[in-house]
Every structure is written in C-alpha cells, then in structure tokens.
Amino acid sequence: MADKRDYYEILGLNKGSSDDEIKKAFRQLAKKYHPDLNPGDKSAEARFKEVNEAYEVLSDADKRAKYDQFGHAGVDPNFGAGSGFGGFGGFGGIDFDLGDIFGSIFGGGSTSARSRNSPRKGERIHVEVGVAFEEAAFGVDKEVSVSRIETCDTCAGSGCKEGTTAERCANCHGTGNVTTQNRTPFGVMQSTSECPKCEGKGKIIHQPCQKCRGAGLVRRTKNIKVSVPAGIDDGQTISLRGQGSAGLNGGEPGDLYITVNVSRHPLFTREGNAVLYDMPISIVQAALGAEVEVPTLDGKVKYNIPEGTQTGAVFRLRGKGITNLRGGGRGDQFVTVKVEIPTGLNNEQKDLLRKFGETITGGTAGVKKKKKLL
C-alpha cells in the first residue's frame, strides 16, 4: 500500500487541476481500460481499478483536500501497512502507531492495526449510456450492462463449500491481527501486524466453495434498468445507490454512476433549457409574410411570419423547449430566420427582379442591365 502511485499521476493531471479536467481524464481512462473492452487483460483491469480509486478521491472535495495535505494516509485507512501508520490518534484525524514507526526504524516491521476482515464498502462503478436528443428532453428508461462483484449465491458469501464452515483462526483468535513486542533503546514497543496464518481474514477455509474458490464473491454482468430523467444534459451523471459492487465482510455495496451521452440532433441545438432552430425562408416569404410550419420537439406547429422580416430575426415559441430537470415546466424554442437568396435564376426571373428593384427605389436600385455584346 505504501508504494501506491500518486492519484494525479494516475489520471495524468497536475495537483491544481479543475474538477472538469479530473472528470474528463477519468472518463477517457475508464473507457480505455474498462474490463468489457479488454477481456482477460489483467493489466487493464488493474489500471481500471487504479483509475477508479483515484477518481473516487479527487472527485470528492473533502477527500481531495485531505489527500493534498497528507497524501494516501489522509484518505486510506489501510495505508501504511508495513510502514508505520496505524492506531495512534492526534494528527489531523490520521491514526499513527508509534510502535509501528519505531518498529520500522529498528527492524521490528509492522502492518496496519486494522484487520482485513473489517467491513468495507463495495467498489464504485462508472458506466455510460447513450440517449437521443428527444429522449434527453422528455426522459426515457434505459438498460445498462454492468460488470460488478456480487456475493456468491452458492455459499452466500461464506466462501465455504456447502455443508461446511470456516475454522476460526487460533493464532489471532479471529481478529486477523497479531500483536508483537520488540525491545528497543526506547523501551518495549508494541506493534500490530496481519496474522500470517489466516492472512488477516480471521478464519481459515479448509473446503472452499468451488464456484467462488473461497472468495465469497463472484463477478457477474447484469443489466440494470435506469430511468433517465427529462431535461438531463450531455455529460451529466445519474447515481444509483447500492448498485455497485458488493461490500466486503458485511460492508454496504458501492454505488453505480451512469454518465449520459446525448446524441446531436439534425435540426436542433440546446442552450440550457432552450431549443435553438435556424429556419430557412424565401425572399418572397420574408417580404410579404407567410404562414410557415416550424418543426419542434412536439411536432410541427404553424407560425405567421410578418411581412418585412429580416434575416437574423428571432421568434420565440413558448413552452417548446427542454423540460426543467428540477421541475417547473419547460423552456422555450427560439427560431432564427435565415432568408435564402435564390441562385440559378433564368433571364426572365432576373428581368423581373430588376423591374421590381426599379419600382421600390424609383430607379435601378443599383441593378444594372448587362450590355449586349455586338
């Protein structure tokens, strides 16, 4: 544990990186090393867990502050196994064991006083789900595939073969730790270390469960239904409490975080709860006014364009935007008019335009007839 890499280094960031930079780096690395994309690759799986751990700390303001000040010792209760962090209070909420410190100096050696068989919360899992523009606007139910650690249903998490039980470790009396005393120039120092007989588990399994091989846990892929709320935006995350990996030693399960990726729409763009749409109209419609059909998320609606409308004019369609994620109705749709200039006119059409130009200006309106070439 003492050789753990720096969390900022894991994510390829500097200590002063912003929350958005941390989130972006995590998403890229989590996708790169996800076990589903690297089946059987133990190295990728290890990197995926490492990236998850780094993000869990750096995305939490309180944990990040402690990490920035104290390093791994400030956020990991098991940090320091074999290097002197243990059970002596009084330094900014971090536990130290003086016996462990002196033991490491004078050759005593030690590990954390906390047992490996104490309850631990399950792993936090991050996945992504894609939704259409309209689905994000109105909400939708989706299924996401999650690879997570679950309690073995064959042995109910005991790790023992059916009909058998684990033996309580006689060496540590089920605590998972053993206490030793070392005589030093400073006196007799007491240190606590992991029980070598049961490897800190506090029990010995003689006949392990064949399905989980004594771990009490198995990895499964499960489809989980998630309700994507109306109004969610691209990159926002939904959390499902307790839907992550199972906890260890009776600890509560971790949480599942689903990041939503909203696809682009061929007509609309989004700005907050507003929908933006550029509507092309002809010169005739702009000059004389016209009733037009405007596409919206609810279907086409009719709108009267007033005469003399200029390109760039903006009209509002109230209540045709995105649902407010926190309730309170919907936003509006803003329609920007784009007057299209006709191209490929024939001679008759050009003459008509010239005559029209003369009538509205009393002259040629800057439109000159081409001289015929003799």
Image (cartoon, rainbow, N blue to C red):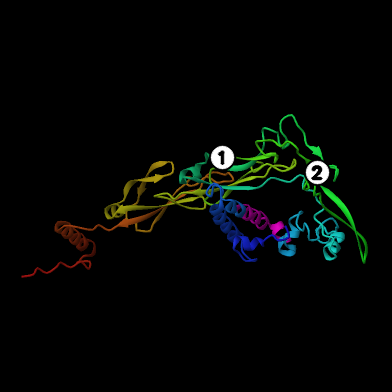
Give the residue number, with chain letter if any, for mark 2: 202
Badge 1 element: strand
Precedes in sequence: disc 2 or disc 1: 2
Spot occupied by residue 243 in the image (x, y as percentages of width and height): 64, 41
Q: Is residue 61 magenta?
A: yes
On screen, residue 168 versus residue 69, left or right, reads: right
Give the residue number, with chain letter if any, for mark 1: 227
Whether 223 is drawn above or below 86: the answer is: above
Q: Amino acid at mark 1?
A: Ser
The residue carrying pointer 2 sits among few (fewer than 14), some (14 to 19) or many (20 or more) residues within 10 Å by Cα, namely many
Q: Amino acid at mark 2?
A: Gly
Range of magenta residues: 48-66
Q: Quadrant of the C terminus?
A: bottom left
Whether 90 is drawn above or below 138: the answer is: below
Q: Are marks 2 and 1 in contact (CB under 8 Å)?
A: no
Badge 2 element: loop
From the viewer's side, name the closer residue of 169 and 329.
Answer: 169
